[in-house]
Image (cartoon, rainbow, N blue to C red):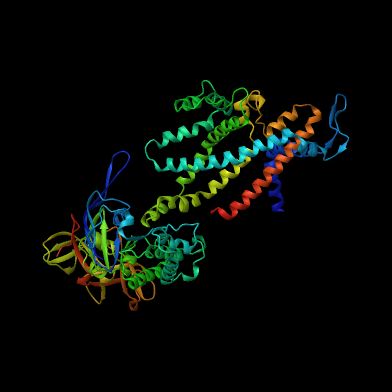
Amino acid sequence: MEIKLQNITKIFQAKDKTETIAVNALDITIPSGKLIGLLGPSGCGKSTTLYMIAGLLNPNEGRIIFGNEDVTDMAPEERGIGLVFQNYALYPHMTVRQNIMFPLENIKVPKQEALVRAQEMADLVGIGELMERKPKQLSGGQQQRVAIARALVKKPRVLLLDEPLSNLDARLRLQTREEIKRIQRETGITTIFVTHDQEEAMSISDEIVLMELGKKQQVGEPQDVYDKPKNLFVAKFLGTPPINILNGEIKNKKIHVNGVPIATAKSANGEVFVGIRPEGFKVVEKSDFVLSAYQVETIGRDTTLLVKIPGEEETYRIIVDAQYRIKPGNEVCFEVDPNKLFLFNKETGALLN
Amino acid sequence: MLEKQSNFKAWLYLTPTLILLIIFTFYPLINAFYLSILADYKIDLVLGPQASGLTLQNFVKIFKNNEFWLAMKNTGIIVFVSVPISVIVALFISVALNSIKKFQGFFQIVFFLPYVTNAIAIGMAFAFIFHSDYGLINLVLGTIGIDPVNWVGTGASWGTAMFALLVYTVWGGLAFKIMVFLSGLQGIDKQYYDAARVDATPRKRVFTKITVPLLSPMIAYITITSFIGAIKAYRTIIGMFGPSLGPPGGDRLITIVGLVYEQIYAGAEARPLAAAAAVVLFAITLTFTGIQMWVSKKRVHY
């Protein structure tokens, strides 16, 4: 089922009457049966958006539409959503089975059917043999699965997950995100999850919605957003190590960084931010773009060079093939891959060219 | 060596507390047990306290005493009626308090006031509320056409006096319970309620399946301490009826602690009886607490 957010605005009012615009005129269409990642730094309004879709918060303005049905004024329980909370909110006094059956008991599903459905769901998420345990006797990853099973057991139209991986350790996180992807694919349910971790969002989402300061920044398939960031924020938010942002100047169709021409450009003359992905540098025999590596991080697959550019305070990271065997202090000549280079307006941060 | 030294320090720091405990808790406790099994206890003006030997006769005497059984009955009723009612009422009031936003602080103060008010003063106020001529209760009853009831006045029956006492006991016990429950409720993660809402949980089920189980440690704590407190009931009766421990000329509402107290001042010979009654009270309290701990181990979710 497709979900449409139309011009959604949420304003929180503090006790002293100061207002915070958490979500600002948000317009998103979430395609049916897809896994969507709502991504952004903390405080960008992504969780608020999720809770508005769930119905636990009401937007000040705008409509929320599930399929053809306007659900804006509906209570959460009428919307047909399954929600997985950040810390799972499993009832600690109930066993796994009781937790999963709880939503079914609320809507008076016959006991026998409820037992069967709970077991099916538990098997789907891979905790079928832990049904008699209490949440405290489970690992974080297992608790997460119980929470997903509880959210899915009543066959909701939408599955919402709030920071589903943030409480897990690094290894479990990898495992669980595959698991979420698998469950979503097997059930085919439209799923929206919130995360501040770009890697997590990019790795499993069919589409990502990138937000900042309550506003939508860019929507699209992860690779498209990565390859064609609409603005400086998007470019900086995606990718590890992050994109290198340099001060540059365009003179006579050439991009100059620190006075050295590094690539050609079609944009008009003037000062710009030059964004180059760490993997966008190519080591060459000879060029004008020479940088000195002051530190070299080897991980085997490739090598990360830490470089300083005269006149810039930041440290930049360049990923090069491991074959080059560059040592700290070496001067290296680079060419820049034009597909990995972006120019941004210095005032607005918008993508140029 | 190191361990020994730190052990010594630990004992050193504990010494002041231990000395106080020994003088004011352990010694009286042991002494009460000892006193309860002394035969022919009396105080000689020259030789001091005297006894002819050890005996269990004091217990036999206590168990044959009608006053003791009246005290047992009164105490039992206070315990088994006032505690469950006040726990349940406090639970509902705190859930209601927790769910309102406006005036929450105001009502919290109102409900907590009895706790910081003198029990004797409240007892006297209640005695007046139940006064047969000027009391609020009879005034209200009068408006719906019920004749004045002699609740606690001269010659009042045991039943009406006990009713008034129970109302007072329940009310007096609410404040602390509400405070504990309220802080417990505020400690429950709001997400449980959001989760329940998303899952279309009826309100009654939210209360019985989520609130009560999550509050069960508080409920167990309050129930056990209230039981112990109610078994020791005395202050409330003094507050309401004065040293006669009952309405003037009527049946007495004496409790076990009241009995112990009266026996202590009934002359030296009665003191072993007071001690025996206290030991019985101790055994009862211990048994009940044991049962409750055992039950709560099975029913309480920490």
Indicate whether A224 appears above or below A52: below
Give x and y (percent) for residue B93: 46, 40
Occupied quadrant, residue A211: bottom left
Q: B70 or A99: nearer the eye?
A: B70
Kindly tell me whether residue B252 is visible in this rendering. Answer: yes
Give x and y (percent) for residue A74: 28, 54
Q: Which residue: 49% across, 34% down? A: B112
Q: A131 or A26: nearer the eye?
A: A131
Occupied quadrant, residue B167: top right
Give x and y (percent) for residue B140: 46, 27
Left or right of B4, for residue B87? left
Q: Which residue: 64% across, 39% down? A: B76
Indicate whether A89 appears above or below B267: below
Left or right of B146, for residue A347? left
Occupied quadrant, residue B23: top right
Give x and y (percent) for residue B99: 40, 43
Count of residue discs: 0
Indicate whether B275 appears above or below A39: above
Left or right of B228, for residue A183? left
Kindly tell me whether residue B229 is visible in this rendering. Answer: no
Left or right of A202, for residue A93? right
Indicate whether A305 appears above or below B278: below
Q: B157 or B83: nearer the eye?
A: B157
Q: Residue furthest top?
A: B133
